[in-house]
Image (cartoon, grey):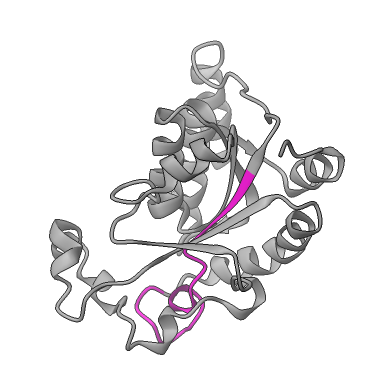
Amino acid sequence: MSQQNVQENLQSNYQGVWGNRIGFGKKPVLLLVDFMQSYTTETEPLFAPDVIKAVQETKDILELAREQDILVIHTNILYHPNQLDGGMWVKKSPVMAAMVATNPATQFCPEVKPLDGELVITKNYASAFFGTSLASILSTQAIDTIIIVGCSTSGCVRATAVDSVQHGFRTIVVRECVGDRHQAPHEANLFDIDSKYGDVVSKQETVDYFQKIKVIK
């Protein structure tokens, strides 16, 4: 069976069961998940070539969000040198042990690095919500929509999307602005997110939304 037939069978099987559209809300945040040089540096174990493209695609969305005074939050992953704070995840995925401050590759990708004054949330696990104050921050700011970009699609992006909807937020993932180390898990997880946890939308849809939105203060 061809890949196209497989995709058509998937869509047919899910149609009418999963895939309801949530849509954009009134007050968004642009959440940049782990755009760190660890994912864009060939010599690093976490290198994921498609993340390089995702970073480039995100540049103008980030610029537009700033122009429109939309809240921007960045996340990264950093561990104590002994990775004790990585718990079972580092044991399961020892590749994560490289995410320590002494590794220069844990710096943000320069094209999308935080500006002074933009919030950076450091996390130890996949979800941007787990063990952090993100949900409380967003609730305090009356945010109803989380626009997710970043990496990796099958890991931290998916985990964040699942927790986002479980915390009651409209969850939006921008297709061109997320990436993974392999196309198969990337597409499979976008399919799952779009079916069950949020809306996977195009970059242009996001740009159109940002251009017309009037952010509630």
x and y percentages locating residue 168 in the rendered image: 47, 27
Image-based side of 185 in relation to 67, left or right: left
Image-based side of 197 in relation to 88, left or right: right
x and y percentages locating residue 179 in the rendered image: 54, 59
Q: Nearer the viewer, residue 65 or 118?
A: 118
* The C terminus - image quarter: top right
Residue 149: within the magenta? no
Image-based side of 107 in relation to 62, left or right: left
From where the camera sits, is residue 1 visible?
A: no
Give the residues drawn in magenta, as a range. Answer: 29-46
x and y percentages locating residue 169 in the rendered image: 52, 31
Residue 42: within the magenta? yes
Residue at the spot x=42%, y=31% of the render? 167
From where the camera sits, is residue 209 visible?
A: yes
Residue at the spot x=45%, y=37% of the render? 164
Q: Above or below — where is 98 with respect to 201? A: below
Question: Outermost residue toward the right?
Answer: 212
Count of numbered marks: 0
Residue at the spot x=34%, y=78% of the render? 45
Residue at the spot x=32%, y=88% of the render? 102
Q: Above or below — where is 189 with respect to 44? A: above
x and y percentages locating residue 65 in the rendered image: 74, 54
